[in-house]
Image (cartoon, rainbow, N blue to C red):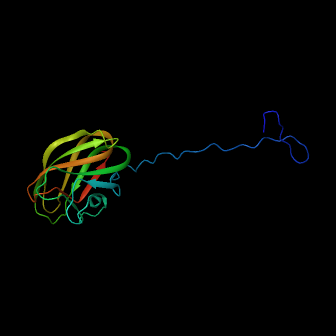
Amino acid sequence: MSEFEVYAASDGTPTTPPTTPAPTTPAPTTPPAGSNLAQGKSATDTTHTQGYVAANVTDGNSGSYWESNNNAFPQSVTVDLGATRTVGRLVLKLPASWGTRVQTLAVLGSTDNAAWSTLKASAAYTFTEGSNAVTVTLPASGVRHLRLTFTGNSGWPAGQLSELEAYAS
């Protein structure tokens, strides 16, 4: 209809032209404060042995785990958070019943899964039997992808992780 046409009711009374609603874009979702940003997200690895795949590090079950090939350091596990999120703290877990071990690892972050920056330089972390959880504090960074690169493990000749939890603070 041109700008000169007039809309009219069946009795000829002028009416308001019909409107088309503007398209809406859903607002980005923000996870609830204090929630694990990695839970249920996709994960990949450089290698794994048997059924100990990367997806186990985000499944919420500390009894399942990822394990890299033996004697093949360095090895990595990467989690895609699905969107860029501010991450300031990681909690890394192994099954609680496992013996104490020290794993050496670095934490890297990326927004595009191509360019990576070091969020925490390689360091040794002690997983103590009974809790087998360590906290890694990071400078608050906006990342979509988190990568842990393992270079040593005193308990087994492979990288091992049952849960990677990521938090804003």
Q: Is residue 84 left or right of residue 97?
A: right
User: Which sits in the foreground, 9 or 37?
Assistant: 9
Q: Quadrant of residue 113?
A: top left
Q: Is residue 140 left or right of residue 102?
A: right
Residue at the spot 35% in from the left edge and 52% down from the top edge: 35
Q: Quadrant of the C terminus?
A: top left
What is the x, y in percent for residue 122?
15, 43
User: Which sits in the foreground, 8 or 165?
Assistant: 8
What is the x, y in percent for residue 3?
78, 33
Residue at the spot 13% in from the left edge and 51% down from the top edge: 73
Q: Quadrant of residue 142?
A: top left
User: Which sits in the foreground, 53 or 84?
Assistant: 53
What is the x, y in percent for residue 164?
26, 54
Residue at the spot 75% in from the left edge and 44% down from the top edge: 18
Q: Is residue 140 left or right of residue 83?
A: left
Work out which residue is located at the far top of the displayed protein and give it.
4
What is the x, y in percent for residue 87?
31, 44
Q: Quadrant of the N terminus?
A: top right
| Vertical side of 47 occupied by 105: above or below | above
Residue at the spot 31% in from the left edge and 48% down from the top edge: 167
| Vertical side of 152 occupied by 60: above or below | below
User: Which sits in the foreground, 150 or 163?
Assistant: 150
Q: Is residue 85 left or right of residue 103?
A: right
What is the count of numbered marks? Answer: 0
Work out which residue is located at the far left of the displayed protein and give it.
154
